Amino acid sequence: MEEAIEKMLHGFRSFRDTYFSGDSELFDQLKHGQHPRSLIIACSDSRVDPALITESDPGDLFVIRNVANLVPPYEPDTRHHGVSAALEYAVNGLQVEHIIIIGHSDCGGIHALMERTPEKPAGEFLDAWLDLAEPAKQAAMVLSNASSHTRHRACEEASLVLGLENLLTFPWIKARVDAGKLALHAWYFHIAAGRLFGYDRAKGGFTEFHPSLHLSQSEDHQP
Ligand SMILES: [Zn+2]
């Protein structure tokens, strides 16, 4: 049982030696504050750590992670909106230039959404959370002759597009997108294949990012 904690503490010692050894320019800067240029919304899945898969440095990414990387719509009420609060801080406070929603294959949250029934709900809190992506499930269920694998992938992709639409329901996100100060992106990481795809608004689908290509295709200021 202690092994997991021991591994993390060992990792922290190594991290500290790397970044706090006294000659790290990066951490000298970061001591004075953060200025990340990108906000990432990713799944809580242990295999899709955004900083790890993009080899980002501390200070590069402001990150929101939740089950199935879902984005709620703008709901200005008095309830506890963790994702919306983080969006507000990143967009209005830190003034990030990019918001990237990163979905992935084999997503447990999407699997739970696809397989749940009124008789077998996904969980006490999961059900209401997954309701956010119910329209993506309905879109995927139209593929009635497809395999469940194909439908799950369709749902994973449709929920990313829905996330882009929901981002634009926040008036201060829409305003910055319209002003050309903020760009919205949706990426899909295929874990088993080690491949990354980006949503191409013109094509209405996901296209693979090839390592040799610059990622300019997703630099649009609209989803
Ligand atoms: Zn997931």
Image (tube, grey):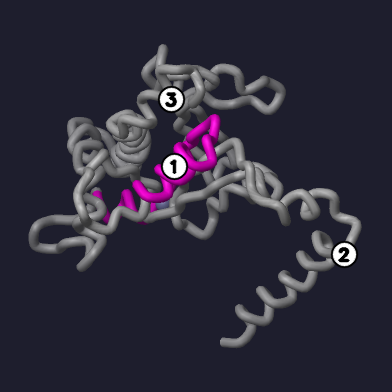
Q: Residue at x 41, y 12 (%)?
A: 202
Q: Considering only order in the chain, which callout, 3 or 1, is on the residue closer to the N terminus?
A: 1
Q: Which residue is mark 2?
A: 21
Element carrying mark 1: strand
Mark 3 to mark 2 CA distance (whole Å): 39 Å
Residue placed most toward the observer, 119 or 148: 119
Does the segment drawn in magenta span residue 145? no
In the displayed structure image, the side of residue 167 where residue 21 appears, left or right: right
Above or below, 164 against 122 in this view is above
Label 1 beta carbon within 8 A of ligand 1: yes
Quadrant showing the C terminus: top left
Q: Residue at x 85, y 54 (%)?
A: 24
Label 2 beta carbon within 8 A of ligand 1: no
Q: Which residue is mark 1?
A: 103
Q: Is residue 154 visible?
A: no
Query: How far across and how far down the image is residue 205, in percent?
Result: 40, 22
Query: How far across and how far down the image is residue 64, in percent?
Result: 46, 50
**Front tag of 3 and 2:** 3
- Could you say which quadrant of the image residue 121 lies in? bottom left
Disc 1 residue crowd, few under 14, some 14–19, many 20+, Cα 10 Å = many
> Please, which residue is most extreme toward the bottom here?
1
Q: Considering only order in the chain, which callout, 2 or 3, is on the residue closer to the N terminus?
A: 2
Q: Amino acid at mark 3?
A: Arg
Disc 3 residue crowd, few under 14, some 14–19, many 20+, Cα 10 Å = some
In the displayed structure image, the side of residue 138 where residue 6 appears, left or right: right
Q: Which residue is mark 3?
A: 176
Q: Amino acid at mark 1?
A: Gly
Asked if marks 2 and 1 touch (Cβ < 8 Å), the reply is: no
**Front tag of 1 and 3:** 3
Query: How far across and how far down the image is residue 6, in percent?
Result: 67, 81
